[in-house]
Image (cartoon, helix red, strand yellow):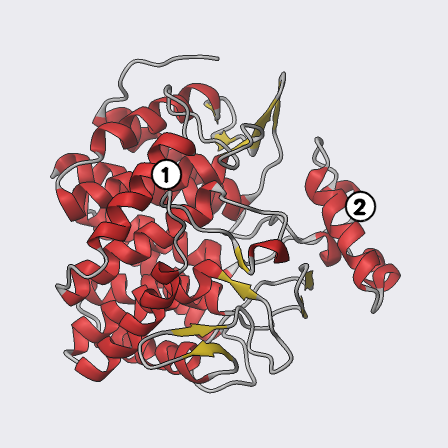
Amino acid sequence: MKTLTAPTRSQCLDVLERVFATARSIDYRGYSKHDALNARWLEVLAGDSKLRRLVAIQAVMRSPVHIRPLIGVRTAMNPKGHSLFARALLGRYRITGDERDADEARVLLRELLDHPSHGFPGLSWGYPYPWQDGGFFAPRDFPNRVVTSFVGQALLDGFETLGDESYLNAARRVATFLLEAPKTLFEDDTRRCVSYVPRDDITWIVMDVSALAGAFTARLASATRDDALMEQASRLVRYVVSKQTDEGAWFYAEPPSASRITHDNYHTGFILDAIAQYGEASGSSEFEAAYASGVRFYEERLFEEDGAPRFMSDRRYPYDIHGAAQGIITFSLRQRHEGRGIDVAHRVLGWTLANMWDPRSGWFYYQKRRGMRTKIRELRWCQGWMSFALSMYLEAADR
């Protein structure tokens, strides 16, 4: 595997600009990991069959070559991708003060606010394709709490960075969806767990969902000085922390047998970031021990010594660009949270630029498997995540 000398600030800024350029060149509309059913003929062929939907989505997702254009998969605006790019632009604006970044972020945030999902209280967003997961089916644009929490974070970034109250008002409506839409899957006096998608027939618990909802709610509570809202945030995060294993990990689902995913890279990073964000917003040290144990597991078991991101704690390959980006984000956030972590973020970034960056095309590779790199161009998965990772790293390194 390649190694790389330490990337300089100017090199990181140059890569970040090239990543933005690729997104602008296609008007921030591209392919996504699970978008196979955006090929109309595949959507018709799959019909109402869970098995046929899963086979179609998995076959396209796992293809080592870029078959989406060949089979008619349509590109689309992915709300999660828009939120990542908007946050990255706002981050670069805070670094350089270039008003063009602020203006471009405003355009993306406006497009998000102009194209929400419908049918539930508050503001919400989903994926722009029909999506069959192991535990549920979501029609095209059906809202979910993961995408909505990411958009909510981008809105709060817009409020804090640009001082625009309209973003805070929209964020309040995001909280309405996250906290009031169906379904509460578990609740007691101190904890609460909510579903991935707002459906009453859902029983499947996906562990990072409540953490993401709790982190956003805590930030909003801090911005609005709402103690009752902060208490709701704490209950969501507390549920997830209560499911941490003795070695500091989290399973993807509850019960663990509900998913083949065990302790994977980027979902672990989501949970750690949520705990850190809750701590910053609330001023509480309640979950610091869980964070310390979790980040130790994350660093030691989900990354190689050279910075390569393991897919799961018991599985090295494929090295996935989302895992690389998440490591940079999580350890950069740890730098802000605890004053340490930038050295690990630096190592992961160095490995990523040496092994997953194609300077000729300006794209990050999707995955690195044994003996080959997968050059599939997924806008949100590759470019969106790395734009946010680079901006987070630059801000943390500047501090």
How many C-alpha atoms fall within 10 Å of the one at disc 2: few (<14), some, or many (≥20)? Answer: some
**SS of the residue at dot 2?**
helix
Q: Is residue 85 above or below residue 144?
A: above
Q: Give the vertical position of 183 relative to 333 (above or below).
A: below
Residue type (three-letter) at the residue carrying disc 1: Tyr
Q: Is residue 277 left or right of residue 302?
A: left
Residue 323, visible in the rendered structure: yes
**Which x, y percent locates residue 303?**
41, 29
Left or right of 183 in this view: 92: left
When asked about the image quadrant of residue 391, the answer is top left
Of 3 and 250, the residue lying toward us = 250
- Answer left or right for 226 relative to 116: left
Tell which tag, 2 or 1, sits nearer the viewer. Answer: 1
Give me the residue at 24% from left, 26% from top: 10
- How far is disc 2 from disc 1 in space, using C-alphas? 38 Å
| Quadrant position of the C terminus in the picture | top left
Q: Nearer the viewer, residue 354 or 212?
A: 212
Q: Name the residue that disc number 1 marks.
A: 298
Which residue occupies the extreme right position in the image?
Answer: 45
Mark carried by residue 71 = 2
- x, y percentage for residue 11? 29, 24
How many marks are shown on the rendered structure? 2
Q: Is residue 97 visible?
A: no
Please, what secondary structure does the residue beneath circle 1 have?
Answer: helix
The residue positioned 57% from the left and 28% from the top of the image is 317
